[in-house]
């Protein structure tokens, strides 16, 4: 039996939809102030459509884009985009790109151009 669009979901229904254990959703509630399901007697949680959309967004940031909880919180606090001053410590890490990064030659003269290239690549990746 399918629920109508806009119907409240229980924590088990949302956990099944996102393929997550229920305790992860409860953890997210403690870390993301934007996720506040309705709680009835006995602490039964009912996720409104806005809560479901927020849980999907959090899931996407953490499990698809690879953000940390801290980074995802910053993204959501900025309305879904990274602020330039927080982009550096919030962006997901791509291990493959790190392995491809040029190794420093050992002198400061050689490091500056390499670091500028890395900065440009990071800026382009964040803009994409």
Image: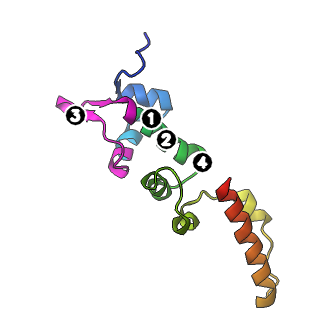
Q: Work out which quarter of the rendered image holds the N terminus and state it.
A: top left
For marks 4 and 3 on the same chain, the one whose residue lies earlier in the sequence: 3
| Residue in the picture at 81% in, 72% down | 102
Label 2 – label 4 distance at C-alpha:
10 Å
Q: Position of residue 41 (x, y in %)?
A: 17, 30
Q: Which residue is under mark 3?
A: 43
Q: Residues within 10 Å of mark 3 (few under 14, many from 20)?
A: few
Label 2 – label 1 distance at C-alpha:
6 Å
Instruction: Single out the mark in the foreground, 1 or 3.
Output: 1
Instruction: Single out the mark in the foreground, 1 or 4.
Output: 1
| Residue in the picture at 53% in, 47% down | 61
Along the viewing direction, whichever of 35 and 44 lies nearer the viewer: 35
For marks 1 and 4 on the same chain, the one whose residue lies earlier in the sequence: 1
Q: In which quarter of the view is residue 103 placed? A: bottom right
For marks 1 and 3 on the same chain, the one whose residue lies earlier in the sequence: 3
Along the viewing direction, whichever of 77 and 11 lies nearer the viewer: 77
Q: Range of the magenta residues?
A: 28-51
Q: Which residue is under mark 2?
A: 57
Q: Is residue 123 above or below residue 10?
A: below
Q: Residues within 10 Å of mark 2 (few under 14, many from 20)?
A: some
């Amino acid at each position: 039996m399918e629920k109508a669009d806009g119907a409240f979901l229980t924590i088990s229904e949302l956990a099944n939809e996102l393929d997550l254990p229920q305790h992860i959703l409860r953890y997210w509630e403690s870390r993301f102030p934007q996720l506040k399901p309705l709680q009835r007697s006995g602490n039964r949680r009912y996720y409104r459509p806005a809560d479901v959309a927020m849980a999907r967004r959090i899931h996407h940031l953490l499990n698809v884009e690879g953000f940390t909880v801290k980074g995802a919180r910053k993204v959501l606090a900025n309305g879904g985009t990274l602020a330039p001053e927080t982009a550096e410590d919030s962006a997901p890490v791509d291990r493959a790109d790190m392995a491809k990064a040029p190794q420093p030659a050992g002198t400061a003269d050689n490091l500056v151009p390499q670091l500028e290239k890395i900065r440009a690549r990071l800026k382009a990746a964040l803009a994409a």
